[in-house]
Amino acid sequence: MTSTPTLVMLDFEEPFIIELDASDKWIGVVLSQRGHPVTYVSHLIGPTKEGWSTYQKEMPAIVMANLPHLYR
């Protein structure tokens, strides 16, 4: 049985983990803290970025994960 993940508020006093993945068409990221997701997002990448290496695709995913939390 699976359950829907419950998002928690980000605590800036605690460390957090960024998990990301990139494929030919998508990039996705999960920001978690203490084993619970804080936010997650996926994004369809355009045809100009399809030829990029995995590392080149993952850098925008890191930025994407942090944008909502940079301005508090």
Image (cartoon, rainbow, N blue to C red):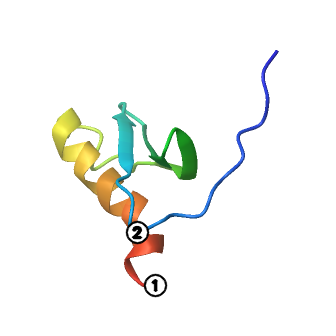
**Residue 12 in picture, x, y percent from top left:** 40, 69
The mark nearer the N terminus, 1 or 2, is: 2
Q: What residue type is labelled 1?
A: Arg
State the image coordinates of residue 8 (x, y, percent, origin top left): 63, 56
Q: Residue 12 carries which label?
A: 2
- Nearest to the observer: residue 54 or residue 16: 16
Residue 4 in picture, x, y percent from top left: 77, 36
* Percent position of residue 32, x then y: 48, 47
Foreground of the two, 67 or 8: 8
Per the image, the residue denoted by label 1 is 72
Amino acid type at circle 2 is Phe
Q: Residue at x 49, y 44 (%)?
A: 34
State the quadrant of the N terminus.
Answer: top right
Please tell me which residue is depicted at 47% across the width and 49% down the height of the picture.
Answer: 33
**Badge number at residue 3:** none
- Frontmost of labels 1 and 2 is 2
In the rendered structure, the answer to whether residue 9 lies left or right of residue 13 reads: right
User: Do the residues under discs 1 and 2 have CB atoms within 8 angstroms?
Assistant: yes
